[in-house]
Amino acid sequence: MHTTPKKPAVKLTEVKITSNVEIAPSVFLLSFMRDFSFNAGQVLGITNDPSEDARLYSIASGENDPEISILYNIKPGGKLTPPLSHLIPGNSLWITAPFGSFAADNKPAYWIAAGTGIAPFLSMFLSGYGNDNILIHGGRAIESFYFSDKFIPALGSNYIRCSTVVSLNGIYHGRVTTYLENINDLPPDRKYYLCGSAEMVVDCREILLLKGIPFNNIVAEIYF
Ligand SMILES: Cc1cc2nc3c(=O)[nH]c(=O)nc-3n(C[C@H](O)[C@H](O)[C@H](O)COP(=O)(O)OP(=O)(O)OC[C@H]3O[C@@H](n4cnc5c(N)ncnc54)[C@H](O)[C@@H]3O)c2cc1C
């Protein structure tokens, strides 16, 4: 007799939201207290209904922060993010244990992000990684450069914001890929961390490989 295999049980833990703030149009920073440790760059599964599959989100907090935050944008028609945006402090969420190997080390690196893909780099930055790192962030509007108030004073000219829409002093007018294509001296011995949509990651990886960066020095996290 054929029986449908059961989904492997994923352990979910209930947490109470402490804040859920819209930091840019349709983009929210949601937080809850934690009682576990994690490595900067890791993700968590999150659901508002423990009978449903969890969606994955990068942790956007420092390793020693008392709270876990995640940065998410509302996907119109999405199952989780529209209801997530209505949750208020005190409401419940269910989370998995943190996991993932998109992990920082203390060697100088390039951190390359698009949109909410900045989250793991904020976590690495807040955790004290990234001495002399270059952070390249692609966004549409000026308010898409989440946490620039933290990055500008700390990273100075090592923080590069790219936008095809915004024409402002201090913002590169063009895509992240165009920015990378126009750098001639990318050091091959550094790690290049990529985080964002599949398209962004694939395009950036191709450019880096063509510029002589060894495959093993390119580490990617794809938000699909
Ligand atoms: C490793 C990893 C880390 C991630 N980290 C983050 C993060 O830090 N922040 C973040 O914002 N996101 C992150 N994501 C993405 C996140 O997990 C969710 O996929 C995202 O938030 C959308 O969830 P949702 O339930 O709202 O949308 P979903 O229900 O998954 O839908 C996504 C889109 O597909 C459309 N859609 C759904 N079903 C159908 C269908 N049957 N036919 C056609 N279209 C359909 C919806 O309209 C919507 O636009 C990450 C993903 C991965 C894999």
Image (cartoon, grey):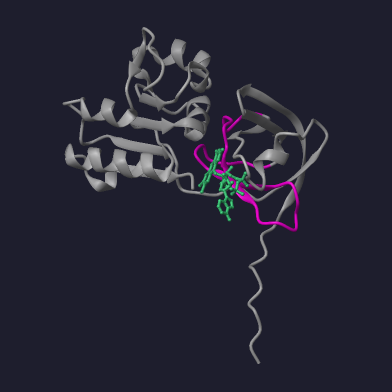
Residue 104 falls in image quadrant: top left
The kind of secondary structure the magenta stretch mainly shows is loop
- In the image, residue 151 sits, relative to residue 74, either above or below, namely above
Identified at 32% across, 23% down, the residue is 174
Identified at 38% across, 31% down, the residue is 111
Residue at the limit of the structure toward the bottom, as seen here: 1
Residue 219 on the magenta segment: no
- In the image, residue 42 sits, relative to residue 73, either above or below, namely below
Identified at 39% across, 9% down, the residue is 168
Residue at the limit of the structure toward the top, as seen here: 169
Identified at 63% across, 45% down, the residue is 78
Residue 105 rendering spot, x and y as whole percentages: 40, 36
* Depth check, front residue: 219 or 24: 24
Q: Is residue 108 visible?
A: no
Q: Is residue 7 visible?
A: yes
Residue 52 falls in image quadrant: bottom right
Q: Which residues are magenta?
A: 36-65
Q: Quadrant of the N terminus?
A: bottom right
Residue at the limit of the structure toward the front, as seen here: 77
Residue 217 rendering spot, x and y as whole percentages: 28, 42
* Depth check, front residue: 204 or 175: 175
Side (left or right) of 85 relative to 191 = right
Residue 55 on the magenta segment: yes
Residue 221 rendering spot, x and y as whole percentages: 43, 44
Side (left or right) of 117 relative to 90 = left
Side (left or right) of 9 relative to 73 = right
Q: How many marks?
A: 0
Residue 140 rendering spot, x and y as whole percentages: 45, 24
